Amino acid sequence: FMRGIASGLSADQVLVLAATRECANTLRDSLALKLQGAVSGSLARTVSSFAFGVMRQAAVAAGQKLPELISGSEQDFILSELIEAEIGEIEAGTSVWPEGFTKQVLSLNGFRAELRDLVTVALEHGVSPDGLSQLGALHSKPEWQAASKLYEQYLHFVSKPEYEGRFDASMLLREATLILQASDSRSIKLVIVDDAQELTPAARRLVTALVSRGSGLVLFGDPDTATLGFRAAD
């Protein structure tokens, strides 16, 4: 960061991305002490925070509703409602879930957590509900085929008018990437990524969109300390 400043870049032209909010806070404090100067924005941000800023700026420019984030607890509530309906189908004998996926299994918090992780990873990789079903058939995973129905229902749920301008974390990164790909802005000259081993597919696509217009890129990482593998970080 300081080498970028020494080479003539302003702090606003250097984007520092961290894996978590705690890491971003630590980096921000450290960089502020080194810089000893005023800046217009945060010196270090998470990828999601930066994506949210991109979405917000685009919404303001277009006169649209400001974006809001669907929290993890709200996402859990949505999935709980969908699972409850699926349990009703099990009781009615019309469920598509394979043997062993009883109503007791679907009622478990662990099942909901696994379903949420599956939906998140599918969104990260840009896999549609139909795509997930096809992958299930290809790899003999009937539970993926069954889950694709809930995945489709989840996407339908968050596309309702009352969810306009609201995004979960993976959808936020995807939409921000599309905005960056369509933009010709070159205000960011250098991108520095800390803990790059924690970049998920959606985060990697966002960083790629940033640097595809000529920005410099510096990555720091240690694969032995990776913690976001459950979200497809690699």
Image (cartoon, helix red, strand yellow):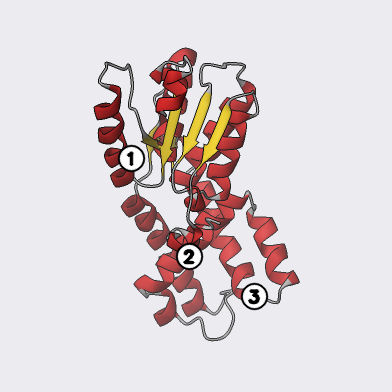
Percent x, y for residue 177? Answer: 57, 33
Per the image, the residue denoted by label 1 is 24
Residue 151 or residue 13, whichever sits in front:
13
Residue at x 32% of width, y 45% of height: 23
Q: How crowded is mark 1: few (under 14 residues within 10 Å), some or many (20 or more)?
A: many
Location of the N terminus by quadrant is: top left
Residue at x 58% of width, y 62% of height: 149
Looking at the image, residue 56 lies above or below residue 220: above
Q: Could you say whether the residue bearing mark 3 is in a helix, strand or loop?
A: helix
Residue at x 58% of width, y 25% of height: 215
Location of the C terminus by quadrant is: bottom right
Marks counted in the figure total 3
Residue at x 53% of width, y 50% of height: 200
Q: How far apart are marks 1 and 3 (CA)?
A: 40 Å
Percent x, y for residue 147? Answer: 56, 66
Q: Could you say whether the residue bearing mark 2 is in a helix, strand or loop?
A: helix
Looking at the image, residue 56 lies above or below residue 132: above
Q: Could you say whether the residue bearing mark 1 is in a helix, strand or loop?
A: helix
Of the two numbered discs 3 and 2 on the same chain, state the one appearing first in sequence.
2
Of the two numbered discs 2 and 1 on the same chain, state the one appearing first in sequence.
1
Residue 106 placement: quadrant = bottom left
